[in-house]
Image (cartoon, grey):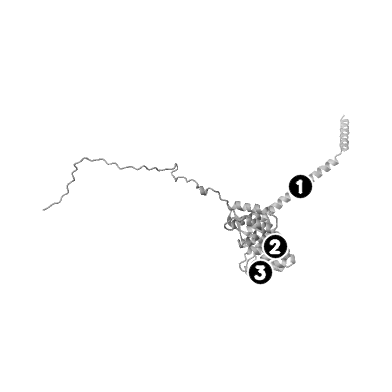
Amino acid sequence: MLSLRYFPVIFTQGLESFEFPRKNCCVVVCAQKGPRPRYPRVWKTRKRIGTISKSVKLVECVKGLSNVKEEVYGALDSYIAWELEFPLIVVKKALKVLENEKEWKRIIQVTKWMLSKGQGRTMGSYYTLLNALAEDGRIDEAEELWMKLFTENLESTPRIFFNKMISIYYHTDLHDKMFEVFADMEELGIRPTTEIVSMVGDVFQKLGMLDKNKKLKKKYPPPKWEYRYIKGKRVRIRAKDFNKSQDASNGASKFDQETDEMSDRSDEDAEAESGELLGEANPSDSVASVEQLDGTVNCLSETRI
């Protein structure tokens, strides 16, 4: 039989050592074992102006102008001349700053200019304009704006606009128009707030309509829960507890005032009594009383002797 066997290879030469060639490589490792810090590029070193600084500049630019329409509009046009897009965020922030500073005329000018450019046509912008017109005393323009918004957005008008118009008519004693706005709210199914109910109830009481006031309070009773924002969080609080806390704070302030008044009155009474006593005690009376005491002492000594 044939057998196949593998015989080991016979190396005639001695083993030789081979060395692989090494390439020179440099590895840069940071001390914190992180990526290498990048240096800012030349074309990114220029600082960009944020919206807050732009809004501050816009407010300063507007404040130094007169109330002439052409001058104000020209300054605002020159301010946004180099902008690629309309700076809506900058204008909104500037309006907020002006509202905090109660610059109502400037708010009206900037808002009308923004709306004339076809920008910012939102309910928030219209409410800012309505509030500024009411605070500036332009009731006729506020009514025109209200009628325009109410006719264009009949069923989608926010409740805050009804609240504002009712408060305007309440403070200006325009009771008929206030009742019309309140009737529109009821027809549209918008539930009035407690402030509106209290305003309308006060007007009913002034006009002697006590039955309507009772019906109003019965139809819209005060809510059981109220929402308050505490440290940025929306918290639900019982209306009774909240009212009690307000009443307690008001009562505490009244009690402090009463105690201060009572203390002042007691001090005044004490001073008056001391003045009367001092006025009654004359020096001649004191000398006479001393002489009487001396006479009684002498009489007692003679009887004893």
Dot 1: what SS? helix
**Could you give the CA–CA distance between mark 3 and mark 2, rounded to whole angstroms?**
16 Å
| Residue 104 visible to the viewer | no
Measure the alpha-carbon separation of dots 2 and 1: 42 Å
Comparing 226 with 3, the one in front is 3
> What residue type is disc 2 on?
Ile
Query: Quarter of the image holding residue 202?
Result: bottom right
- Give the mark, 3 or 2, whose residue is nearer the N terminus: 2
Residue extending farthest bottom: 187
Where residue 278 sits in the image (x, y, percent)? 83, 40
Determine crowd level at label 3: few under 14, some 14-19, many 20+ residues with C-alpha closer than 10 A: some
Are the residues at dot 3 and dot 2 in contact (C-beta closer than 8 Å)?
no
For the image, the number of numbered tags is 3
Residue 61 location (% of width, % of height): 65, 53
Give the farthest residue toward the left. 1
Q: Which residue is mark 1?
A: 264
Which residue bears the numbered disc 2?
Answer: 168
Disc on res. 184: 3
Q: Is residue 274 left or right of residue 28?
A: right
User: Who's the residue at 71% across and 51% down the image?
Assistant: 255
Quarter where residue 293 is shown? top right
Going 69% across and 60% down the picture, which residue do you hit? 134
Q: Nearer the viewer, residue 290 or 11?
A: 11
Give percent across and percent down for residue 272: 81, 45
- What element does badge 3 sit on? helix
Q: In the picture, residue 86 is in which quadrant? A: bottom right
Give above or below for 125 relative to 15: below
